[in-house]
Image (cartoon, helix red, strand yellow):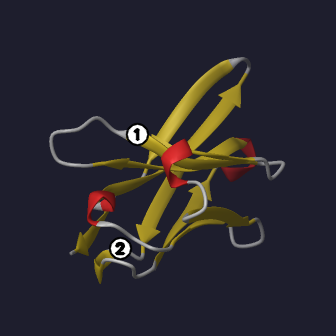
Amino acid sequence: QVQLVESGGGLVQAGGSLRLSCAASGSIFSINTMGWYRQAPGKQRELVAAITSGGSRNYADSLKGRFTISRDNAKNTVYLQMNSLKPEDTAVYYCNAHLEIFAKGYDYWGQGTQVTVSS
């Protein structure tokens, strides 16, 4: 079991920045990849960025250059730095932890944090 607690969401004007944090606890040694997803009203949840235990990063093409994912292994925390925010970035952002145990995948989710970008 993995528990994820997100923080850092809020209201920001277009062009501003926010940093989201996600602290993991529990079976953290089994985590392969941590990532951020978002879901806007009426839309499907989509990948924002992910980072593996080895530090490899993956971003949604549309967000490259504005968003940066990083992790602090000592704090078991992953961050999402969001710059040059746009109103279309408004969504609930979810932290995800993906585990691979005996060739079976498991996904854990945080409770979500609201990001609202005003124009």
- The three-letter amino acid code for the residue at tag 1 is Glu
- Residue at horizontal 26 percent and vertical 65 percent from the top: 87
Q: Is residue 82 above or below residue 91?
A: below
Q: Which residue is mark 2?
A: 9
Q: Residues within 10 Å of mark 2 (few under 14, many from 20)?
A: some
Residue at the left extreme, as displayed: 42
- Residue 107 image position (x, y, % from top left): 51, 35
User: For the residue marked with disc 2, what is the amino acid?
Assistant: Gly
Under circle 2, the secondary element is: loop
Closer to us: 105 or 82: 82
Pick the residue in front: 36 or 29: 36
Quarter of the image that includes the N terminus: top right
Please report the residue visible at 31 percent of the width from the left and 77 percent of the height from the top.
14
Residue 24, placed above or below residue 119: above
Q: Is residue 31 above or below residue 67?
A: above
Q: Which residue is mark 1?
A: 46
Query: Which quarter of the rendering shows the C terminus?
Result: bottom left
Q: Quadrant of residue 26?
A: bottom right
Spot occupied by residue 45 in the image (x, y as percentages of width and height): 34, 39
The reply to whether residue 60 is in sight is no
Tag in front: 1 or 2: 1
Q: Is residue 107 left or right of residue 8?
A: right
Query: Circle 1: is it few (<14), some (14-19), or many (20+) Cα within 10 Å?
Result: some
Of the numbered discs 1 and 2, the one sitting upstream in the chain is 2
**Residue 87 visible in the shown view:** yes
Q: Is residue 89 above or below residue 34?
A: below
x and y, in percent, of residue 99 in the image: 64, 35
| 104 or 49: nearer the viewer | 49
